[in-house]
C-alpha cells in the first residue's frame, strides 16, 4: 500500500490504555505502513484512519475509539468493567488479531480487563500491607514518562510514547503467543489426566501449562513432569488450590524434605537420585522420571 495509515491519539501525557490500544492496532495492521499522530486538534483528529482515546466519539465502524465523550463513557461489560480505549479496540480487533475467540478472551481477562478497570478508576487489587504494592503493567508504562530533569534536557512525551509503545507491542505479542500455546497444551494435560491410573498424581511428558486445567478437577495433588534444567531431570510439583489467587497447595510435600539436597534428600526419602526440595515444600527434583514419580508416591502417603 502506498498510502500511509494514520493512527491518531492524544498529545501530552499518555496512559496504559492508549498505549496498548495503539499497540493492538499496529499489530493488527502488520506490515501496513502507518504513522502515529499525537494531537488534540480536532481538524487533524477527523482525518485519522484510526482515532484512539481522543475526539469524543466512539464509533467502531468508523474506527473511532474514545471513551470520554459522555457520562458513562463508552459503556461497560456485563461484568461491570467499563471500557477504556484499549477495551474498545480489543472488542473490534482482538479476535481477528489472535485468530481465535478463545485466545482473545484469555487476553481480555488477563490484560484488557485490569487496564480498562484501572483507567476508569476501578480498584483491581487490595494491598496486603503498606510496604507491599503489586508492580503492575501501569508501572511499566509509567516509567517511560520523562522526569522534570529529562524534559529540561529536551526529552518529551512523544518520544516517551514511542518507547512505551514498543514495550507494549512486545508484551501483547508474547501474551498472544503464550495464550495460543497454552490452549494447545491443555489438550495434552487433559489426556494425561484421563489416562492417569491414580488421579492424585498426574504425569505430563512435556512442559505444558497444567495449573488451570488440573485445578478444575478435585483429585490431583501432584504433577510429575520434565524439569527445565534438562539432562533427564524430572520434578514433582504440588497442585495449588487456586493457581490464580493463592500459593496454598492442596497438599505440601513432606516437611522433612524442606531445603534438603542431593545425599541428604536421598537419605531422608530413600530415592537415590533425589536432588532438591524447595524449603516451601511445593517442588522437588530427581535425576529421572522414575525418581520424581517415587517422590510423588511418598508424598501422597505422608501425613
Image: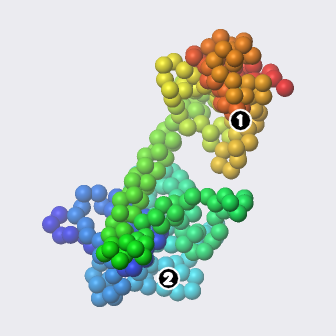
For mark 1, what is the residue?
280
Q: Nearer the viewer, mark 1 or mark 2?
A: 1
Residue 27 in view in this figure: yes
Q: x%, y% of residue 246?
A: 70, 47
Q: Which residue is mark 2?
A: 68
Q: Is residue 8 left or right of residue 185?
A: left
Q: Vertically, is 168 above or below 38?
A: above
Quarter in which the C terminus is drawn: top right
Name the image quarter holding residue 166.
bottom left
Q: Position of residue 154 (x, y in %)?
A: 31, 75
Q: Residue at x 29, y 57 (%)?
A: 30
Numbered marks: total: 2
* Residue 93 in view in this figure: no
Q: Residue at x 51, y 29 (%)?
A: 228
> CA gap, disc 1 to disc 2?
48 Å
Query: Dot 1, how many residues are within 10 Å of its Cα: few (below 14), some (14-19), or many (20+)?
Result: few
Coloured how?
rainbow
Quadrant position of the N terminus in the picture = bottom left
* SS for dot 1: loop
* Residue at point 51%, 42% (across, down): 183
Give x and y (percent) for residue 38. Answer: 33, 77
> Observer-nearest residue: 212 or 9?
9
Give the camera-side residue of 21 and 11: 11
The structure residue drawn at horizontal position 70% and vertical position 63%, both measured from the top left corner, is: 130
- Which of the two discs, 1 and 2, labels the residue nearer the N terminus? 2
Amino acid at each position: 500500500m502506498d498510502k500511509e495509515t494514520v493512527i491518531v491519539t492524544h498529545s501530552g501525557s499518555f496512559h496504559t490504555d492508549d498505549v496498548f490500544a495503539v499497540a493492538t492496532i499496529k499489530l493488527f495492521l502488520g506490515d501496513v505502513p502507518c504513522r502515529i499522530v499525537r494531537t488534540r486538534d480536532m481538524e487533524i483528529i477527523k482525518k485519522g484512519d484510526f482515532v484512539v482515546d481522543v475526539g469524543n466519539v466512539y464509533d467502531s465502524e468508523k474506527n473511532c475509539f474514545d471513551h470520554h465523550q459522555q457520562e458513562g463513557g463508552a459503556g461497560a461489560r456485563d461484568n461491570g468493567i467499563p471500557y477504556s480505549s484499549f477495551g474498545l479496540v480489543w472488542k473490534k480487533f482482538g479476535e481477528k488479531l489472535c485468530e481465535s475467540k478463545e485466545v482473545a478472551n484469555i487476553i481480555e481477562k488477563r490484560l484488557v480487563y485490569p487496564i480498562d478497570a484501572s483507567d476508569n478508576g476501578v480498584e483491581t487489587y487490595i494491598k496486603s500491607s503498606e510496604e507491599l504494592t503489586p508492580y503492575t503493567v501501569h508501572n511499566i508504562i509509567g516509567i517511560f514518562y520523562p522526569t522534570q530533569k529529562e524534559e529540561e534536557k529536551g526529552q518529551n512525551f512523544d518520544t516517551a510514547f514511542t518507547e512505551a509503545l514498543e514495550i507494549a507491542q512486545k508484551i501483547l505479542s508474547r501474551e498472544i503467543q503464550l495464550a495460543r500455546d497454552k490452549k494447545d497444551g491443555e489438550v495434552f494435560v487433559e489426556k494425561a489426566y484421563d489416562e492417569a491410573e491414580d488421579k492424585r498424581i498426574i504425569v505430563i511428558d512435556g512442559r505444558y501449562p497444567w495449573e488451570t486445567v488440573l485445578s478444575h478437577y478435585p483429585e490431583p495433588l501432584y504433577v510429575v513432569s520434565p524439569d527445565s534444567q534438562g539432562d533427564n531431570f524430572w520434578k514433582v510439583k504440588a497442585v495449588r488450590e487456586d493457581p490464580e489467587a493463592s500459593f496454598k497447595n492442596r497438599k505440601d510435600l513432606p516437611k522433612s524434605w524442606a531445603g534438603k539436597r542431593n545425599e541428604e534428600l536421598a537419605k531422608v526419602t530413600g530415592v537415590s537420585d533425589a536432588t532438591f526440595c524447595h524449603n516451601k515444600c511445593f517442588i522437588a527434583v530427581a535425576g529421572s522420571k522414575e525418581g520424581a514419580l517415587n517422590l510423588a508416591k511418598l508424598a501422597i502417603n505422608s501425613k
